[in-house]
Image (cartoon, rainbow, N blue to C red):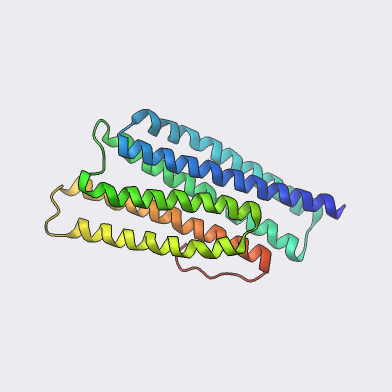
């Protein structure tokens, strides 16, 4: 009986890892739409968010069913509660990629990112995408060491965000208010994706070790 229950817990975490894979694809496609001013790709990201939402609902229903029927305690309870929090954060990461896609769509046929700002935004997008990909593996493998490694990537994201703000607020910013607003929002969206990735990874650590990891970002 307990073995079957633990198989169900593994199934929940497999579903969480699959959602993280979906989010990684969404982040990558949103960035593609942004940098290429591609309205079709942007629309695909926006409409595809419904799949992530539906996957979240399935995980929640499964988890609540297990809570109700099995009445787990100790580590099993910790695992299910953490999973519910993780799926909410993963779904929010998908929402943030939709926000990126909506900015891309709004500025078509132009790009929302001025040429001189593109390297910073491109790097932020790459860091965010890589972090989400690592989170999928961390969830699937309950990888505590991998979770700790995300901190350095998050530090890079924070530094990129600070650099972007300095550029936007500089006296020699040549692009006007609208691009500055777009870039400020884009930087915030990618930064929050990274923050949520760290938070999800920290919850995996909590599931495995029983020790909560305090994060000031997410």
Residue visible at 65% across and 45% down in the picture: 15
* Residue at the extreme top: 40
Dividing the picture into quarters, in which one does residue 111 lie? top left
Can residue 75 be seen here? The reply is yes
Dividing the picture into quarters, in which one does residue 212 lie? bottom right
Residue visible at 31% across and 49% down in the picture: 121
- Which is more toward the observer, 218 or 197? 197
Residue visible at 33% across and 39% down in the picture: 34
Q: In this view, does 198 lie to the left or right of 208?
A: left
Q: Say if 196 sits above or below 175 in the image.
A: below
- Which is more toward the observer, 158 or 214? 158
Residue 147 percent coordinates (x, y): 56, 62
Q: Is residue 122 left or right of residue 88?
A: left
Can residue 101 be seen here? The reply is no
Q: How many marks?
A: 0
Residue visible at 80% across and 51% down in the picture: 5
Residue 36 percent coordinates (x, y): 31, 35
Q: In this view, does 164 lie to the left or right of 188?
A: left
- Which is more toward the observer, 173 or 84? 173
Q: Is residue 138 left or right of residue 43?
A: right
Residue 109 percent coordinates (x, y): 25, 30
Residue 170 percent coordinates (x, y): 16, 60
* Residue at the extreme right: 1
């Amino acid at each position: 009986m307990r073995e079957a229950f633990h198989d169900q817990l593994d199934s929940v975490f497999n579903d969480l890892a699959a959602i993280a894979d979906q989010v990684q694809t969404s982040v990558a496609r949103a960035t593609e739409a942004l940098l290429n001013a591609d309205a079709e790709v942007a629309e695909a990201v926006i409409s595809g968010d419904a799949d992530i939402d539906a996957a979240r609902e399935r995980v929640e229903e499964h988890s609540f069913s297990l809570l109700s029927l099995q009445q787990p305690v100790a580590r099993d309870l910790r695992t299910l509660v953490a999973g519910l929090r993780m799926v909410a954060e993963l779904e929010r990461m998908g929402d943030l990629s939709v926000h990126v896609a909506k900015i891309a769509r709004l500025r078509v046929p132009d790009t929302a990112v001025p040429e001189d700002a593109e390297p910073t935004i491109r790097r932020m997008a790459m860091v965010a995408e890589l972090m989400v990909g690592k989170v999928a593996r961390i969830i699937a493998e309950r990888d505590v060491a991998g979770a700790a490694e995300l901190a350095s990537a998050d530090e890079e994201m924070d530094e990129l965000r600070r650099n972007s703000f300095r550029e936007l607020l500089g006296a020699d910013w040549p692009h006007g208010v609208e691009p500055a607003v777009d870039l400020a929002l884009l930087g915030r969206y990618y930064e929050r994706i990274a923050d949520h990735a760290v938070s999800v990874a920290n919850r995996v650590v909590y599931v495995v070790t029983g020790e909560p990891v305090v994060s000031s970002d997410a």
